[in-house]
Amino acid sequence: MRKFLTKIRFYTATLSVFILNLNVFGYSLKGICSPGFNCHGCPWATAACPIGVFAFGSAVRRLPVLALTSILTIGIAVGRLVCGFFCPFGFLQDLLYKLPFPKIKLPKFVRYFKYAALLLLVFVLPYLIGFEQSGFIKVDKPEIDKTDNGNINVTITVENISTHDVTSPEVKLSYIDQETKEEVYSESKQYPDITIKAGETVTLPEIVAPNKLGTADLHVTSPQSNVLQEVPYKLYFCQICPKGALTASIPNKLGTETTGTYASSGWFNLRYVILYVFLILMMISSRPFCRILCPLGAIYGLTAKYSVVTMSVDKDVCINCRKCDKVCPVGLDVVKEIGNAECIVCGDCIDVCPVNCITRDIRFKKKNKDEEITCNGQ
């Protein structure tokens, strides 16, 4: 029979996958961050990915206070226990590792790569590079003059509220039926000889349109009112993320959308190559993404020292059988490294310890005292 903690980990991870992908039923909470690594570009995703939020915040040079506070709170509360029990991508790695393939051990130095990814691809490079943002315009309410021949003259004023010039501004006139709310007439007009400089307001030449105001409402829009942001050099973590490639880029590619962060032109660009490499690694080594590249795991690792939930081993009782090392999903020297930044607090080592010297601990600190009180237990 499988051990108790291993069973619990399987059930909590399964439940987490379900809860974090409730948008398949129409439940979306993208205003909050998921605790586990789950791409918000996935059409099923319930919540936002904290790494995507941090990278975007860095690119627009804004501090995402709510996201940062929530993730640090989770990290200080339970540390990397989230990785072991509630991360959908960690769960996928556990499942693929069970496939009957030859297994390899990853060298320990690869654990530092994820901290480099967190620093460079989530914070530093997005901050330095920012976004390539196209110019966009704000369309004011149009002025309408009725004519004697049953038409109307529509005068449209637009303002360039971006930092880039807008060339060849385009507007679209649409009549929306007052009862059916359906579009009954539309007309587009482009002005190739006009350039609107950043911050400039321009009144465009009049447009003559049929008068349907008795039964329909006139709406004036512009495709250049949509902000188009491109990532220079593809040096943000979201551009290479294998989770994003698997659950956002592939559905995007198989669907109708062809633009945006998760769109791609071929099956063998950098994003997909990284995905293919990690899928292979997941079958032959335990939790390679967690150990090599996961920036969210790096954040939780940095909070592990202060986490309320941790792990410890009683070295006086330990018989040095090394059974714990064989089952550790992140390849720790358990006696020396348990409870450190790499430990995902999964409890697999507790299950196999023949002398019960490993415990999951809840740490508290008394006020006005330096000594730490530890309550041990599973």
Image (cartoon, rainbow, N blue to C red):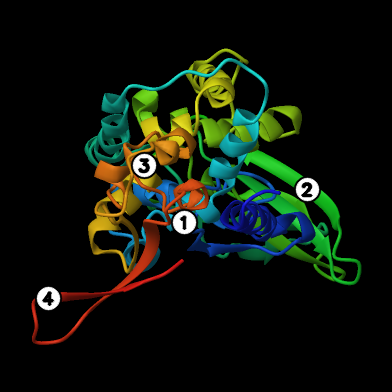
Vertical position of residue 323 compared to residue 216: above or below? above
Quarter of image, res 250 = top right
> Which residue is most to the right?
180
- Tags 1 and 2 in contact by the CB under 8 Å rule? no
Residue at 38 percent of width and 36 percent of height: 322
Direction from residue 60 to residue 53 in the image, left or right: right
Q: Quadrant of residue 106?
A: top left
**At which x and y percent is residue 132?**
36, 34
Whether residue 241 is situated above or below residue 201 in the rendered picture:
above
Q: Label 2: which residue? A: 186
Q: Nearer the viewer, mark 1 or mark 2?
A: 1
Q: Which residue is mark 3?
A: 295
> Looking at the image, is mark 2 or mark 3 nearer the viewer?
3
Mark 1 → mark 4, Cα distance in angstroms? 27 Å
The residue tagged with tag 3: helix, strand or loop? helix
Q: Which residue is mark 4?
A: 371
Which callout, 4 or 2, points at the residue further toward the start of the chain?
2
The secondary element bearing badge 2 is classed as strand
Tell me the mark number nearer the camera, choosing from 3 and 1: 1
Q: Quadrant of residue 330?
A: top left
Tell me the residue at 49%/34% (across/down): 287
Q: Which is nearer the N-term, disc 4 or disc 3?
A: 3
The numbered mark at residue 82 is 1
Whole-percent x, y for residue 366 in the image: 18, 84
Q: Give the residue drawn at x 25%, y 43%.
A: 336
- The amino acid beneath tag 3 is Pro
